[in-house]
């Protein structure tokens, strides 16, 4: 799928993003840009605003100030219907705390975005099975999220985020519940898939070994993107 008319600039950019929750300033003027096909690691201490940044960039949370531009279109200006259409067709999101649908099995969770896009159930489930396989959880396909381990659910969530072939995948600590061997397997599968499909990845992680899979790393510090290697 084309990225629209904005081939020269970044695919996705957040400029001067500000977001407060009551008196907590989660973002205080964060700037970040992601090119098409780029894998960008976002690191930073707990509470530094990483998840908030991801929620703003993916159009889930509206920033108090600043703007998010995707393929040359400002998300703030889009009607809710267009924004959700864009999120559904162009973005894949893995939340920090799972968010698989508890009533559905792993296969049906992964099949759901395809079915919503009009693919029939049998074909959707078959494709979903292949994606679970890639992430090493095909055997858990008929389990519901509550019956899976945290790491298995994370892998199913990654499969679900990638199944529709999005242009950007947002992954918030996708290996947070995995040991180092499983992290390596999941990162290898994620990077392989992203490279193959030209998918850009915004990868939030606190794990330096996971960040090392990225093309580039930025660090959030107190709600702003700080240059790497500079200590406060
Ligand atoms: N929905 C919310 N309501 C109130 N405060 C919030 C909310 N979401 C985030 N915050 C606050 O905003 C700040 C940034 O939170 P955020 O979740 O973005 O951090 P993070 O870098 O993802 O942290 P972690 O590494 O622990 O996941 C924190 O101080 C947090 O308490
Ligand atoms: Mg977080």
Image (tube, grey):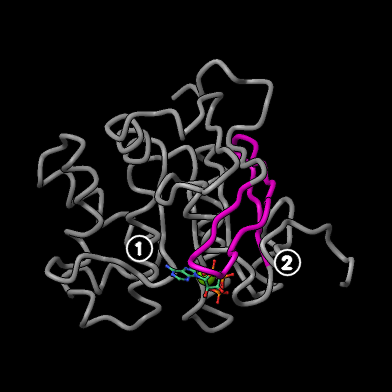
Disc 1 under 8 Å from ligand 2? The reply is no
SS assignment at label 1: helix
| Residue 140 circle label | none
Q: Are marks 2 and 1 in contact (CB under 8 Å)?
A: no
**Residue at horizontal 66 percent and vertical 58 percent from the top:** 41
Disc 2 under 8 Å from ligand 1? The reply is no
Q: Within the image, what quadrant is residue 44 found in?
A: bottom right
**Residue at horizontal 65 percent and vertical 32 percent from the top:** 10
Task: Answer yes or no: is residue 170 visible.
Answer: yes
- What crowding class fits label 2: few (fewer than 14 Cα within 10 Å), some (14-19), or many (20 or more)? many
Q: Residue 25, how many percent across, how many down?
A: 60, 64
Q: Is residue 129 magenta?
A: no
Q: Nearer the viewer, residue 49 or 173?
A: 49
Task: Answer yes or no: is residue 185 visible.
Answer: no
Which residue was labeled with disc 1? 157
Eyeballing the image, is 46 above or below 120?
below
Q: Is residue 35 magenta?
A: yes
Eyeballing the image, is 25 above or below 33?
below
SS assignment at label 2: strand
Q: Main secondary structure of the magenta part?
A: strand
The boundaries of the magenta stretch are: 17-43
Q: Residue 58, how many percent across, how many down?
A: 46, 46
Which residue was labeled with disc 2? 221
Q: Residue 100, how many percent across, how many down?
A: 26, 66
- 150 vs 196, left or right, is left
**Residue at horizontal 37 percent and vertical 52 percent from the top:** 161
- What crowding class fits label 1: few (fewer than 14 Cα within 10 Å), some (14-19), or many (20 or more)? many
- 172 vs 104, left or right, is right
């Amino acid at each position: 799928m084309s990225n629209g008319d904005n081939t020269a600039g970044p695919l996705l950019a957040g400029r001067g993003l500000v977001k407060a929750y009551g008196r907590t300033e989660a973002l205080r003027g964060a700037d970040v840009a992601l090119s098409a096909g780029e894998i960008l690691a976002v690191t930073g201490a707990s509470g530094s605003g990483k998840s908030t940044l991801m929620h703003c960039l993916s159009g889930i949370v509206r920033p108090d100030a600043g703007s998010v531009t995707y393929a040359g279109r400002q998300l703030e200006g889009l009607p809710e219907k267009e924004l959700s259409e864009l999120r559904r067709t162009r973005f894949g999101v893995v939340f920090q705390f799972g968010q698989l649908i508890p009533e559905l099995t792993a296969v049906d969770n992964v099949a759901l975005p395809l079915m919503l896009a009009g693919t029939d159930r049998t074909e959707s489930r078959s494709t979903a099975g292949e994606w679970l396989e890639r992430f090493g959880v095909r055997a858990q396909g008929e389990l519901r999220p509550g019956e899976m381990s945290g790491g298995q659910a994370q892998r199913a969530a990654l499969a679900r985020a990638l199944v529709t072939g999005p242009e950007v995948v947002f992954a918030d600590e996708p290996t947070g519940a995995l040991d180092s061997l499983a992290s390596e397997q999941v990162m290898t599968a994620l990077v392989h898939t992203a490279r193959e499909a030209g998918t850009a990845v915004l990868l939030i992680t606190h794990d330096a070994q996971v960040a090392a899979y990225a093309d580039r790393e930025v660090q959030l510090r107190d709600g702003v993107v700080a240059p790497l290697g500079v200590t406060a």
